[in-house]
Image: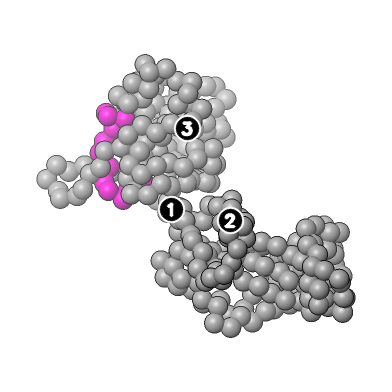
Amino acid sequence: MEKKMKEANSKVNANDDKLYVPTVLSLLEHDENVMSDVQKEILEEEIAELPQIVEGQLNVAGVYVYDLGEKLEVKAYIRNGLSEKVILRKVPFYILNSKDEILAQQMFNLESLGEIPAHSARPVKLYFEKQNVKVDTIAMDDWKVQFDSRLKASKTVKTQYEDLPEDIDIEDKLVFDNFLNELPELNEGEVSVSTFSVGIQKGGNILVTLVVRNGNNQSINMEKIPVTLKDGNGTVVKSELFELKNFTVNALKARVCNLIFPTGVNVEEDVALKDWSVSFRLEELGSQSN
């Protein structure tokens, strides 16, 4: 085993005025439950020996690199110096020497690490396939692991409804709230459109209810939205470009949007079309999903 604490993305200068932040051990619930206190203490000691990181920095620091034969095992800590939790997904990693020559490089999917809380450090083991390693051996005193310099952390944000009817029933409000809470996490700066329901009304109109979430720090104005409606067999029955009038969603808010597709069908009562689906692009009528 080649073991040596390695700094990845931070340079510490005792004479500068940067704000450095401590990071505490953060484990997934399973690891928290199965690890002994002694194991946790060892991890905490490793974290304490790592170079400091600056407030607002997302950092990876390597602990050891070990040649398993077919793969190269690297133990590292992902450290979050941000004031908010982050979620990492597909991230390119490099192993470099002191000359910044690339010794190995590989893309890793880190979704299994879950949310990394603010000012915390989460251990991870990276397994580089030998085909992605460019050298026969890596010197124990001359290596470091780091992210691709273009990596940007994804901050997740929470949204709350705005402009719901004042006379909405408590039960209906609860249904909308539960729907919002169960949607996939929204990254800062993202806008998402999700289908709440599809149904046909007594008058024959198909009503599509959407929930638009705004993860930006400023309001957005949606003028047009392409919507394709498919039946339970995946056949396109309606496809239109809707023009929205004065549809603004404020920062970190969610707003309900109702779209109506007129039909020539009359029904005696409202019917939910639970097996129908909505996509946000224009498609040819009568076509089917593959």
**Magenta stretch, residue numbers:** 47-58
Neighbours of disc 1 within 10 Å: few (<14), some (14-19), many (20+) = some
Q: Which residue is mark 3?
A: 28
**Above/below status of 288 relative to 246:** above
Q: Residue at the location (58% across, 59% down)?
A: 170
Q: Residue at the location (45% across, 20% down)?
A: 35
Tell me where residue 34 appears, x and y as whole percent: 48, 20
Of the residues shown, which amino acid type is indicated by label 3?
Leu
Tell me where residue 231 appears, x and y as whole percent: 83, 63
Tell me where residue 56 appears, x and y as whole percent: 31, 50
Q: Earlier in the sequence, mark 1 or mark 3?
A: 3
- Between the residue at mark 3 and the residue at mark 2, the CA separation in whole angstroms equals 30 Å
Q: Earlier in the sequence, mark 1 or mark 2?
A: 1
Q: Which residue is mark 1?
A: 155
Q: Which residue is mark 2?
A: 174
Q: Is residue 173 shown to the viewer in this render? A: yes
Q: Residue at the location (37% across, 22% down)?
A: 40
Neighbours of disc 3 within 10 Å: few (<14), some (14-19), many (20+) = some
